[in-house]
Image (cartoon, rainbow, N blue to C red):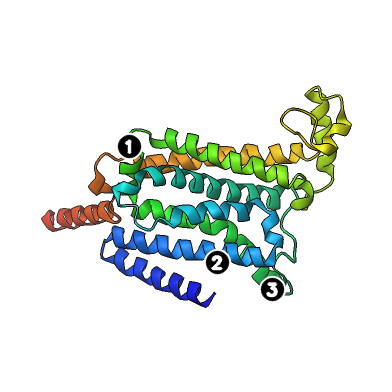
């Protein structure tokens, strides 16, 4: 924990200093080092506590460790590796954050109050840690896209957003499906109201699933629908739509610019400021 804290703080200062001097490559490298340490620490602490290992959020931390463990993505030799590890981590970060936001704010679910026993008696700190686990991957990807725009432009090439979505969604849903097989009742896991069981039965009837008892054993269909599948779908649909929107924004802000130099942090801002100052200097006061 101490070494992780020192690394994250040091890397954060490096990102700030290099960002001020418009050196995105060095700042991007520091971001990956800090993010790797952060997510590795989260996973190891979760493994020690054990209870967080029941949640998809912790499983997705492994995807973040794999991607951010690639410190220097400016190296073209690593393009093939980054071309699948980045989409998987990006989609997982957006999906998990949106999914948890929907569950905790609209569906009546959330995380247990004693998820982290050491700080369970401090609700504010406990809530902050749970929230940080969900928002930090998104923040890391936002900064990563800002600092490594030119690298992503090279890595994705002609594939663009389509490659990001196909690979990212494919890998994430594979991980998610394995998770659902091993943790079959998401209603109980995420403390959702029992009314979701009734909604599952009603939805099963509309879909023509006559053997409702099979829902309890996740054998209702070939897709292994369980008595929580209405809740699962209610999370997947808005989260997937959010991922599509996030990928579209990523493509528009990072992948679409054709001039790589335009993606250097601060380049457009500095050009705008310089143009404004030149226009002010060239302006002549009108005679009274």
Is residue 281 shown left or right of residue 49?
A: left
Q: Position of residue 46 (x, y in %)?
A: 64, 63
- Helix, strand or loop under label 1: loop
Q: Name the residue under label 3.
A: 119
Q: Which mark is residue 41?
A: 2
Q: Locate residue 168 relative to residue 173 in the image: left or right.
A: left
- Judge the density around disc 3: few (<14), some (14-19), many (≥20) Cα neighbours within 10 Å: some
Q: Name the residue under label 1.
A: 157
Specify which label sits upstream in the sequence, 1 or 2. 2
As helix, strand or loop, the secondary structure at mark 2 comes to: helix
**Residue 277, how many percent across, how many down?**
18, 58
* Residue 200 spot, x, y in % from top left: 80, 35
- Which quadrant would residue 18 be assigned to in this image? bottom left
Q: Can residue 239 be seen in this view?
A: yes
Residue 164: percent from left, percent from top: 45, 38
Please identify, in this view, whether the residue under mark 1 or under mark 2 is nearer the observer: 2
- When asked about the image quadrant of residue 240, the answer is top right
Which residue extends farthest front? 77
N-terminal-most mark, 1 or 3:
3
In terms of depth relative to the viewer, which is nearer, 283 or 133? 133
Q: Label 1 crowding class (10 Å Cα cut-off): few <14, some 14-19, many 20+?
A: some
Residue 284 appears in the picture as rendered: no
Q: In this view, does 104 lie to the left or right of 149?
A: right
């Amino acid at each position: 924990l101490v070494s992780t804290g020192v690394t994250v703080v040091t890397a954060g200062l490096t990102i700030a200093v290099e960002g001020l001097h418009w050196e995105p490559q060095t700042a991007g490298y520091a971001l990956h080092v800090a993010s790797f340490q952060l997510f590795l620490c989260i996973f190891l602490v979760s493994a020690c506590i054990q209870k967080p290992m029941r949640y998809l959020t912790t499983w997705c931390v492994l995807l973040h460790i794999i991607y951010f463990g690639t410190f220097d993505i400016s190296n073209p030799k690593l393009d093939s590796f980054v071309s699948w590890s980045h989409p998987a981590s990006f989609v997982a970060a957006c999906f998990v954050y949106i999914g948890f936001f929907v569950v905790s704010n609209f569906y009546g679910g959330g995380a247990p109050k004693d998820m982290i026993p050491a700080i369970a008696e401090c609700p504010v700190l406990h809530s902050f840690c749970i929230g940080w686990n969900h928002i930090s991957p998104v923040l890391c990807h936002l900064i990563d896209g800002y600092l490594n725009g030119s690298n992503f432009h090279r890595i994705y090439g002609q594939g663009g957003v389509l490659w990001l979505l196909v690979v990212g969604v494919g890998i994430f849903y594979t991980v998610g499906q394995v998770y659902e097989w091993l943790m079959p009742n998401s209603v109980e896991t995420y403390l959702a109201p029992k009314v979701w069981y009734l909604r599952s039965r009603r939805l099963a009837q509309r879909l023509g699933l006559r053997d409702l008892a099979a829902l309890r054993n996740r054998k209702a269909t070939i897709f292994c629908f369980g008595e929580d599948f209405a809740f699962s779908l209610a999370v997947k649909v808005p989260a997937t739509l959010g991922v599509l929107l996030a990928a579209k924004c990523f493509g528009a802000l990072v992948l679409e610019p054709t001039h790589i130099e335009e993606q250097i942090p601060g380049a457009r801002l500095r050009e705008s400021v310089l143009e404004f100052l030149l226009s002010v200097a060239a302006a002549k006061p009108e005679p009274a």
